[in-house]
Image (cartoon, rainbow, N blue to C red):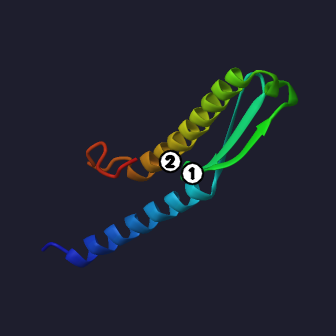
Amino acid sequence: MFDAGGLGGMLAGFQQQLKSIQDECASTHYSSSAGGGAVEVTVNGQNQIVSVLLSDESLEDKEMLEDLILVAVNQANEAAKSDLQERMSALTAGLPIPPGLLNF
């Protein structure tokens, strides 16, 4: 006979683990630098910028500085996304879940 309570409990446990991973990633900081350290950007797991550090030398060329900030922000966001994907893949390893179903 099919044990619906067991499946419900398993799903509740999975959802709890999923929420825990999302919370951990949201509170984790991911940093990236560009231009040999001229710009350093830190984001959290929710892709919110936490800090931007600029070297004095980077202030001399406005256009280059703008480009370096974009590069550093994009790299930091990619690191956050990659970390979440790795953690989620470990959680869902072996489960027949179609890609993209859990939005990670």
> In percent of the image, x 75 and y 31: which residue is there?
39
> In terms of secondary structure, where does tag 1 sit?
loop
Q: x%, y% of residue 94?
A: 34, 47
Number of other residues with Cα within 10 Å of mark 2, as a class: few under 14, some 14 to 19, many 20 or more:
some
Q: x%, y% of residue 78?
A: 54, 36
Task: Using the numbered discs, state the Cα–Cα distance from disc 2 to disc 1 in whole angstroms.
Answer: 8 Å
> In percent of the image, x 74 and y 35: which residue is there?
40
Residue 60 versus residue 15 in the image, above or below: above
Residue 82 as seen in the image, left or right of residue 49: left
> In percent of the image, x 55 and y 48: which residue is there?
47
In the rendered image, which residue does mark 1 sit on?
45
Residue 21 versus residue 52 in the image, above or below: below
In the rendered image, which residue does mark 2 sit on?
84
- 87 or 64: nearer the viewer: 64
> In percent of the image, x 56 and y 54: which residue is there?
25
In which image quadrant can residue 65 be found? top right
**Residue 13, which numbered label?**
none
Residue 37 versus residue 95 in the image, above or below: above
Residue type beneath disc 1? Gly
Which label's residue is closer to the chain start, 2 or 1? 1
Callout in the foreground (2, 1): 1
> In terms of secondary structure, where does tag 2 sit?
helix
Looking at the image, the residue that sits furthest to the bottom is 5
Q: x%, y% of residue 11?
A: 32, 68
Looking at the image, the residue that sits furthest to the left is 1
Q: Mark 2 and 1 residues: CB-CB less than 8 Å, in contact?
A: yes
Residue 40 versus residue 103 in the image, above or below: above
Residue type beneath disc 2? Leu
Looking at the image, the residue that sits furthest to the right is 56
